[in-house]
Amino acid sequence: MNQLTDLTANKKRVQSIDILRGIVMIIMALDHVRDYFHIEAFTGDPLNPDTTTPILYFTRWITHFCAPTFVFLAGTSGYLIGLRKTKAGLSSFLLKRGLWLILVEAVIISLGWTFDPLYHNIIFQVIWAIGISMVLLGLAVRLPYEVIFAVGALIVLGHNLLDYPEADRKHDVGFVWDLLHNGRFDTYNFAPGRVLIIAYAFLPWTGIMFMGYSAGKLFEATVEPIKRQKALLIIGSGLIALFVVLRLINEYGNPFPWPPQKDALSTFMAFMNVQKYPPSLMYASITLGPALILLALIENVQNRFTDYVKVFGRVPFFYYVLHLYFIHIFTVIAFYLEGYGSKDISGQTPFLFRPVQFGYPLWAVYVIWIVLILALYPLCRWYNKYKATHTQWWLSYL
């Protein structure tokens, strides 16, 4: 009976990670659908209080939870994988998987974003950030747990100190520093007619992954569920409190302060608008804080909704690749239905079949998003079952 109870508890703690990951990945798809289908995606800033609407602001802001939660849980999963491996085995796995993800970002993911088989643009985004962070974590796992935690905390809490010298140089910091911390979608030519776009500078994301790895200790089978949930609630609440305090002080933790606006709603929007590229301390606090609280609250929840979303959470890489290609295929179909022709395929952006003035109202974005999720579910369910019944070595890399 005790073994059965332990097995049930173990299943719940791991399922809560899958459920949370599934939720944020569904939300992530909303942002990517907006990128391709919203009429103002390339011409306006949805987070600008002066020009946005509450629903458009919410549509963009809610997706802020996705990348940090995704990266954090990748670190947590790394810790749990390590419970079944030696330190050397875990290090080797993380190094190889990290390098594989970097290659995938450059070859498969970039193609999904651009649909350009000649690779005029390669984009380093979240998969690149996860990949290089896994490589660094693979090198670090041989260190004591306390050192990994300290390094992660130091990066997350302290990396915004680098904002000041970057601002002094007007963010003209060069290729290596753009990869490390600045990012901001800076571009670099790596061959004639070929450009690398750096969207995700990796250092802050590495800090988040290291913290996720450190949090994995809470998910060991020896930790009582009530203690784990209490710890997650305390840490999550503490992060939200840290965000509020730092935002009210309005000095450190985000490169730009929030100015009072014309009305209370606009002021609230400005208050909540924090920097994602690269992720500021305030951004990490207000996204990971609620995510950890939700992780605690859903551990004992099982219903049709959680059964549905955890299917996506169990196959994150498969889902991520698939959703990009589906969105872009949907875009191609809409492109031709709207009367565009071959002369319009390539334009002012790296994304083929997506003219700047193309798009639909926001309500249509939500409809397309729902259709996308419904279309992806049976494929993800099939792949989840396939992984559960097959043991090929390469499945651990997908």
Image (spheres, rainbow, N blue to C red):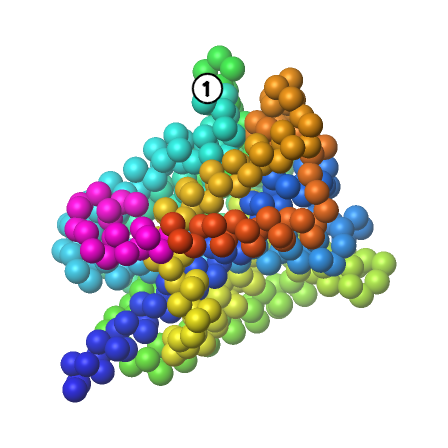
Residue drawn at point x = 40 percent, y = 33 percent: 108
Tell me residue 274's x, y (percent). 62, 54
Which amino acid, mark 1? Leu
Residue drawn at point x = 50 percent, y = 53 percent: 373
Quadrant occupied by the N terminus? bottom left
The residue depicted at 28 percent of the width and 56 percent of the height is 385
Q: Can you say whether 237 is above or below 393 in the image?
A: below
Specify the farthest residue to the right. 262
Q: What kind of secondary structure does the magenta stretch mostly adopt?
A: helix
Give me the residue at 53% from left, 36% from top.
328
* Residue at far top of view: 192
- Which residue was labeled with disc 1? 118
Q: Is residue 386 above or below residue 247?
A: above
Instruction: Residue 325 in the image: state x and y as whole percent.
Output: 47, 38
Residue 169 relative to residue 109: left or right? right
Using the rendered image of the protein, determine whether residue 135 is visible from the camera's viewpoint. Answer: no
Q: Is 389 in the magenta?
A: yes
Q: Mark 1 Cα within 10 Å, few/some/many (few <14, many 20+)?
A: few
Q: Nearer the viewer, residue 301 or 240?
A: 301
Q: Is residue 391 left or right of residue 42?
A: left
Q: Quadrant of residue 33?
A: top right
Q: Is residue 352 visible?
A: yes
* Front in this rendered view, residue 31 or 187: 31
Q: Position of residue 63 (x, y in %)?
A: 57, 55
> Which corner quadrant holds the C terminus?
top left
Magenta span has 64?
A: no
Q: Hey, which residue is sitting farthest front in the picture?
A: 337
Q: Is residue 84 above or below residue 233?
A: above
- Range covered by the magenta-colored residues: 380-398
Residue toward you, 173 or 190: 190
Secondary structure beneath label 1: loop
**Whole-percent x, y for residue 3 in the image:** 16, 81
